[in-house]
Amino acid sequence: MATEATAHGGYRDILRAPHALRLLTGTLVGRLPNGTGPIAMTLFVRDQGGGYTLAGGLVAAYGLANAVGQPLLGRAVDLKGQPRVQLPAAVLSAVGMALFALVGIGNLPLAYAAVVLAGFFTPPLEGGLRALWPSVLGREDRVHRAYALDAVAQEVMFTVGPLLVTLLVAVWSPAAALLVINLIGVLGALSVVLSEPSRAWRSAPREAHWLGALRSPGLLALLGSFFFVGLALGSITVAAVAYADDRGTPSVYGWLMAALGLGALLGGVLYGARRWAGAPERRLRVLVALLALCYLPLTLTPGPVAMSGLAALSGFFLAPVLACAFIVVDRHAPAGTVTEAFSWLVTTFGVGAALGSAAAGPAVEIADTVAGFAVAGAGGLAALLVLLATGRVLNDPDAPGRGSRHAVSGGAATVVHTEKNAL
């Protein structure tokens, strides 16, 4: 059940809060290298004469390294604070991608090492922003609406990012696109860590446990589902390049990715315009079912105009799924692990996307482009099955070590959420 959003709960109210627009924009810009990395890397490899399997392998290496680095860096942020981790990581990640742009695929061991460096040190800006929202916005309803705004803003990046990469490739080269995108990313991270909320933020006290956030059964269930959502999106990245090559128009790739992002943007705006009643875990199952259903028509591979429409449809429920998942993560994360918990979501998503890219490459080369898109459909259905199979633990947000998990800003505890309230 949904009700219309009240004026005080609207997006405008969120953006007018002190520091909110800067943090959202800085995080968005800082994530640009990671958000467009698979696209830019695939185009770069193809420009260098490499095949889809090599492109998928490099993207997979980048994604897997990112998956390993995100929770480790997220835990470091919870322990050490944001500026001491985020900015050095952003610089090291940019250095790795610059090295890849300079060496190309002529020296494969060095190329793989470079993308692994770039992926591992991708700063956990997503988890960091979601950890900052309580201290910046105060009320629980505003924090939940910020999660929806966060998901919508991501789709702005996924809409504009592919077009920016395509433009940089057309004006200069794929190598120049890699360099420029990563320079922009460092500037975004710098904007975030120099802000007052980022400098003042401290994690809530945490129970010492080697599993950290992963000791929550509900969080594990969510991560299992999001692995397959990532797999679906990763396969679309590679399959869309194959589709563009089949049509003899490389620019079609950028338009397909932009259409997917635009669909998610529209879906996120409509989803965030309402306040939703009921448990978010149940709502998430419905949203993932709709997301999976919208992936299936991609296998029809019609002409570019119709295919762009199908790409937009496939993205329509993505931002709502993300916004709802953010609330679920917040409800299930153990005390003092908020950045790490959100980083695990990014990690699982990244692992799935990497394996989806790696699977779609051979699928396209062995079979055809339709097979690449079929991987996406299978991933969406698997994500739904995981949520259905784990409904019992996912529906119970209570877990050992939960208590107050919220940040301390400026030395004073700021309790913003209640443990059981849903959006």
Image (cartoon, rainbow, N blue to C red):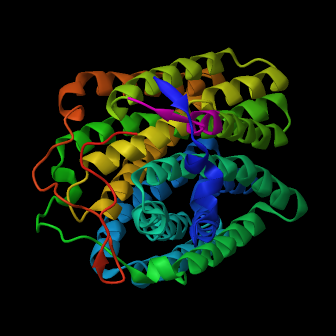
| 279 left or right, relative to 353 | left
Residue at 25% over, 52% down: 333
Locate the N terminus by quadrant: top left
Q: Residue 407, can we see it?
A: yes
| 223 left or right, relative to 110 | left
Q: Residue 49, can we see it?
A: no
Residue at 79% over, 20% down: 306
290 or 379: nearer the eye? Answer: 290
Q: Give the magenta range.
A: 267-277
| Residue 363 placement: quadrant | top right
The image shows residue 370, relative to residue 171, as above or below, that is above
The image shows residue 339, relative to residue 374, as above or below, that is below
Magenta stretch contains residue 274:
yes
The image shows residue 81, relative to residue 312, as above or below, that is below
Residue at 60% over, 78% down: 191
Locate the C terminus by quadrant: top left
Percent coordinates x, y for residue 319 in the rendering: 56, 39
298 or 262: nearer the eye? Answer: 262
Q: How many marks?
A: 0
Percent coordinates x, y for residue 150 in the rendering: 55, 52
391 or 407: nearer the eye? Answer: 407
Q: Furthest residue to the right?
A: 171
The image shows residue 346, relative to residue 280, as above or below, that is below
Percent coordinates x, y for residue 101 in the rendering: 67, 69
Percent coordinates x, y for residue 130 in the rendering: 44, 59
| 37 left or right, relative to 329 | right
| Residue 367 placement: quadrant | top right
Magenta stretch contains residue 151:
no
Q: Furthest residue to the front?
A: 7
Residue at 76% over, 56% down: 165
